[in-house]
Image: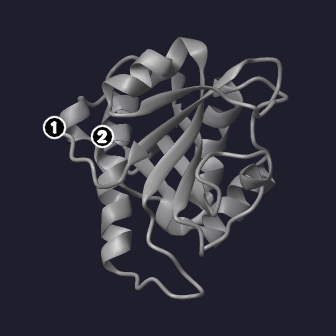
Amino acid sequence: MSALSELTFRNLQSADEVRAAYPFEVAGYSEEEAASLESMLYRFTNAPHLFFGAFEPSGTVIGYITSTQATSPLVTHDSMSTHDPKGSTACIHSVCVDPKWQRKGVATKLLELYPDTVRQYNSSVEDTSQKAKIARLAMLAREDLVPFYQQVGYTNLGQSSVVHGAEKWYDCIFDIQKRLIH
């Protein structure tokens, strides 16, 4: 197993990489919460700029973040299955890491680097009636993970009105203008 410093962080570049990452989705969420492979491929096809991964030196994906854009300032039930390029919110749907790599800093590094990826996208896009720059990241977090997300710069807005599986979820946001020191 490589050290964290030997990993590469970049956008996923193919449907095969999405398929290789899919087992982490199934391992990371309950059956009723996990996205289907079709949903993940939809997100990759429609918002590839928001599908960011961690890779071993061999090129094997070991973790990822996936989002889609929405016009709502928070994640909604509808935003989980759609992408609206006119939306200024990137709704994070999954932060998943290969179980062999968990608790080794991979998720933290993905979350620290993700805003830079979004800023890079913003620098390549003009706000138009068809596309918007992303102003914020939003996610639903399980209560036990809220402190983790707060450590990487997210603000907890309290319990979400979204019902997704049996867990209670909390709305967390990250202002894309915020700079993290890493």
- Residue drawn at x 59%, y 40% as measured from the top left: 94
Please identify the quarter of the rendering in which residue 144 is found: top right
Helix, strand or loop under label 1: loop
Q: Position of residue 53 (x, y in %)?
A: 43, 49
Label ID, residue 152: none
Q: Can residue 113 be seen here? A: yes
Q: Residue at x 34, y 30 (%)?
A: 108
Question: What x and y, as percent, mark residue 106?
Answer: 36, 31
**Image quarter (top left, top right, bottom left or bottom right) of the C terminus:** top left
x then y, percent, for residue 84: 66, 70
Q: Which residue is mark 2?
A: 112
Dot 2: what SS? helix
Q: Is residue 166 above or below residue 107?
A: above
Of residues 15 and 94, the one nearer the viewer is 94
Kind of residue sitting beneath label 1: His
* Residue 56, placed above or below residue 2: below
Front-most of 90 and 38?
90
Seen from this angle, which residue lies furthest top?
Answer: 144
Give the crowd class for mark 2: few <14, some 14-19, many >=20 residues within 10 Å.
some
